[in-house]
Amino acid sequence: MIVTEPMSERNSAPILLTVTQAAERLAVRPSTIRSWLGKGILPKTKCGRCTRVAASAVEAFISDNTTRSSHSRASRQSAPSDPSTSEPCPDPNLHDGEHGG
């Protein structure tokens, strides 16, 4: 059984997750986790024939791959409602009605 609850300070062994548990925490498929483990994107711990992922590695992955939006909430709320006065879209194919679909 894999312990997923925080451990006391007396027992500071890392919390290890199965590939499936790591995938659930990151909302990806287990095959994606296996690919990331093979590429070294996520570090793995081998327990005999089993592969485990430290919960701290998953948390670090989330932290390292989280980016802040370039627009703050305040700027979105004060954005002009008239599209002709807003900044031009960097990709003209992204404007409504201008793409081929």
Image (tube, rainbow, N blue to C red):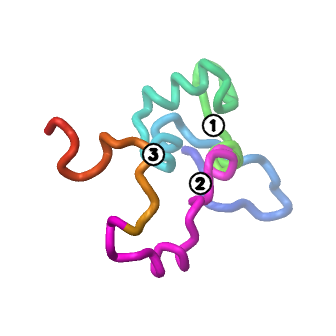
Does residue 75 show up magenta in the picture? yes
Front in this rendered view, residue 34 or 2: 34
Q: Which mark is residue 90?
A: 3
Q: Is residue 28 left or right of residue 10?
A: left
Residue where numbered disc 2 is placed: 4
Q: Amino acid at mark 3?
A: Pro
Q: 46 above or below 90?
A: above
Which-is-in-front pick, marks 3 and 1? Answer: 3
Secondary structure found at label 2 = loop
Q: Which mark is residue 53?
A: 1
Numbered disc total? 3
Label 2, label 3: how far apart the Cα atoms are: 44 Å
Span of residues in magenta: 61-84
Q: Are marks 3 and 1 in contact (CB under 8 Å)?
A: no
Which-is-in-front pick, marks 2 and 3? Answer: 3
Q: 16 above or below 12?
A: above
Ranked by sequence position, the earlier of labels 1 and 2 is: 2
Q: Which mark is residue 32?
A: none
Q: How would you rate the neighbour count of disc 1 (Cα within 10 Å): few for under 14, some for 14-19, many for 20 or more?
A: many
Q: Amino acid at mark 2?
A: Thr
The residue under the point 34% across, 43% down is 92
The residue under the point 43% across, 26% down is 31
Q: Residue furthest left?
A: 101
Indicate the position of residue 44 as horizontal and vertical percent values.
67, 29
Secondary structure found at label 1 = strand
Front in this rendered view, residue 21 or 33: 33
